[in-house]
Image (cartoon, grey):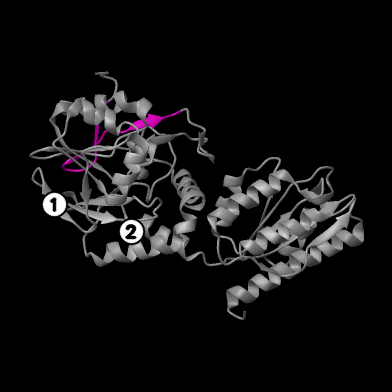
């Protein structure tokens, strides 16, 4: 075993034995400029339990960290909280090497793991089931659609520790294992980005899950997710943050995003921005030549308005705008007001198609699409300002409850 890789103790019985992926920059379409971690945990009591594994290429790193604590052959039980390959990719290889007595996954997890790897001897963990394994007490909590149908969390009562799989995680490679050891601005940014781009569609489900976890009446002192750092101080903070994210309450913030060919739609965007800011709305402008879809969704998570601009190309919406809106439509942001705009030379379908996307997203549109032919003159820019002002006024009505 490679002696470079060491386990990190995170509670009385638990060690982090995961892997750090410093080089990954794209995680199935999610930009990861700070890399990521694949967290696995070793529970060492009367027997040894492994919680989750890692992406398959990192199997040897996982086993080396285990070996820094105990011989991997001592692993008696494995619990797979989530079947996505970044957590289960090494699972069957590890099973083959350590030959555990039992492996547990949710009922849906059994199906998903079989779909990836073929049938295997895995036992179903029932929702709410409590087990004493190896002298410690574990409870399985089914968390369907947070964020896959198979997802579950495992609570270790002896350490008051919640293994939260993809919940409360973030894509962040670091040499530090705990959130309180990392710059707080980085933690806030990556936590928000992760929720916005992965968990937003499941906000209502997550909110109910938080109710359910709190109804269990169990104390939680440590939250150990499958990506990013472990939460060990003030664990109410990530829970309360998720509550706020789930609510998706509109705020006095607007996101204006657009692309432009020759600058005309960009001029319109700046006019819309001026109209919004003149009404006191904090506005973030995201040109798609220099901003990606992850950034758009991150900024939108706690916004109240979305205004989108597109030129027309070949009788269609501009491709980069279509990409962002397709992505946003799948993530289902809620409680937004907004509008569509764009410039054109010949036919002018771009802004209308933006409107159609926004309607599918159930954005409360304040006006028909604003289209300008070729370069906007002063009068057209004034129209853009008025459009921004109209969005701002509607947002104020929504926030004040006068809608």
Whether pointer 2 and pointer 1 mark residues with C-beta atoms closer than 8 Å, the reply is no
Residue 100 locus on image (x, y percent):
16, 34
Q: Earlier in the sequence, mark 2 or mark 1?
A: 1
- In the picture of the structure, the residue carrying the numbered disc 2 is 236
Residue 272 locus on image (x, y percent):
76, 59
- In the picture of the structure, the residue carrying the numbered disc 1 is 131
Residue 68 position (above or below residue 48)? above
In the image, is 305 to the left or to the right of 21? right
Quarter of image, res 145: bottom left
In the image, is 51 to the left or to the right of 303? left
Residue 21 forms part of the magenta stretch: yes
Quarter of image, res 12: top left
Residue 305 forms part of the magenta stretch: no
Q: How many marks?
A: 2
Q: Which quarter shows the C terminus?
A: bottom right
Q: Residue furthest top?
A: 2
């Amino acid at each position: 075993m490679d002696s470079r890789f060491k386990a990190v103790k995170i509670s009385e019985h638990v060690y982090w034995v995961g892997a750090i992926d410093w080089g990954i920059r794209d995680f199935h379409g999610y930009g990861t400029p700070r890399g990521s971690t694949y967290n696995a945990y070793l529970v060492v009591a009367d027997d040894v339990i492994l919680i989750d594994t890692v992406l398959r290429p990192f199997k040897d790193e996982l086993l080396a960290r285990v070996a820094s604590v105990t011989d991997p052959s001592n692993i008696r039980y494995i619990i797979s909280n989530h079947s996505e390959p970044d957590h289960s990719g090494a699972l069957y290889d590890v099973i083959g090497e350590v030959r555990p007595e039992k492996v547990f996954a949710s009922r849906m997890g059994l199906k998903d793991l079989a779909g990836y790897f073929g049938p295997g001897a895995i036992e179903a963990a029932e929702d709410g089931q409590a087990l004493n394994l190896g002298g410690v007490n574990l409870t399985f909590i089914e968390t369907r659609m947070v964020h896959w149908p198979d997802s579950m969390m495992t609570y270790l009562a002896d350490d008051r520790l919640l293994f939260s799989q993809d919940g409360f995680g973030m894509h962040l490679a670091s040499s530090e294992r705990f959130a309180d050891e990392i710059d707080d601005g980085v933690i806030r940014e990556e936590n928000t980005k992760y929720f916005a781009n992965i968990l937003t569609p499941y906000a209502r489900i997550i909110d109910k899950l938080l109710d359910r976890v709190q109804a269990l009446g169990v104390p939680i002192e440590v939250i150990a997710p499958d990506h990013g750092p472990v939460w060990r101080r003030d664990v109410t903070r990530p829970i309360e943050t998720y509550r706020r994210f789930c609510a998706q309450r509109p705020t006095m913030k607007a996101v204006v995003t657009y692309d432009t060919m020759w600058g005309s739609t960009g001029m319109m965007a700046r006019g819309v921005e001026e109209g919004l800011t003149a009404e006191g709305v904090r506005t973030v402008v995201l040109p798609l030549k220099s901003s990606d879809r992850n950034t758009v969704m991150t900024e939108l998570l706690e916004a109240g308005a979305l205004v989108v601009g597109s030129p027309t190309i070949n009788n269609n919406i501009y491709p980069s705008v279509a990409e962002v809106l397709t992505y946003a439509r799948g993530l289902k942001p809620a409680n937004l007001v907004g509008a569509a705009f764009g410039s054109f030379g010949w036919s002018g379908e771009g802004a209308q198609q933006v409107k159609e996307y926004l309607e599918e997203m159930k954005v409360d549109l304040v006006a028909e699409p604003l289209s300008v032919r070729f370069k906007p003159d002063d009068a057209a820019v004034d129209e853009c300002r008025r459009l921004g002002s109209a969005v701002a006024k509607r947002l104020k009505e929504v926030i004040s409850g006068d809608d």
